[in-house]
Amino acid sequence: MGRRKLWINREIQLKTVLYVFVFLVLTSIFISISTFNSVWSMLVNYLAVGDQKNLIRIFDVTFKTFAIRITLLTIFLAILACLGMLILSHRIAGPAYRITQALKDLQEGRKPILTLRKGDSMGDVMTELKNFSVLHFNLINTSKRVLEIWNKTQVQDPSLNMALKELEDCFQIMPQNQENNSKKEEV
């Protein structure tokens, strides 16, 4: 079954829908008025002559004018729409990219940069990622302290020893990444 909830993220979706709606309405109004004006202004000039032989010529001229102007206006306004959507999507794609980079940094044991530009979308996602980052590093530090204490003491419980060994194995990759990060920062 498909999604039941149409509005997932109201901020992003509402901005997009309103932009497209307003743009389409304005585009339609602009094209219609422009076409009506240009076609009828030429018709008035030809009909004023009152010659019936000009009907075929009137049709040809108005059709060519109508087709060319509608095509050019549509292409021009479509380019404007694409630029507008590109700007709007940039406010979404930029934060998505930054969040992806932050998740990679977290995975590699580095502290990520968790800021967005003014006007960017997904601020609530970034706030949750900041909260997760704090929790993530608190868990890492607490786990490392537990492992240090475990290494200094003799624990008789084999299941606890196995669990702590598994925890220690999780950290075998991280020190290498932190050393690599230090080298990257120096360069």
Image (cartoon, grey):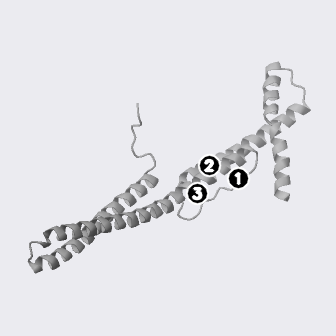
Q: Disc 3 or disc 2, which is closer to the eye?
A: 3
Mark 1 secondary-structure assignment: loop
Q: Disc 1 or disc 3, which is closer to the eye?
A: 3
Callout 1 touching callout 2 (CB < 8 Å): yes
Residue indicated by mark 3: 94
The dot on residue 129 is: 2
Q: Describe residue 117's horizontal placement relative to residue 73 as left or right.
A: right
Q: CA distance from mark 1 to mark 3?
A: 15 Å
Q: Is residue 132 above or below residue 57?
A: above
- SS state under label 3: helix
Which sits in the foreground, 58 or 116? 58
Quadrant where the N terminus lies? top left
Circle 3 residues within 10 Å: few <14, some 14–19, many ≥20: some
Q: CA distance from mark 1 to mark 2?
A: 10 Å
> Going 52% across and 63% down the picture, which residue do you hit?
119
Residue 87 percent coordinates (x, y)? 50, 63
Residue 64 locus on image (x, y percent): 27, 67
Question: Quadrant of the rendered structure where residue 145 is?
Answer: top right
Under circle 2, the secondary element is helix
Q: Position of residue 177 (x, y in %)?
A: 81, 45
Tag 2: Cα neighbours inside 10 Å, few (<14), some, or many (≥20)?
some
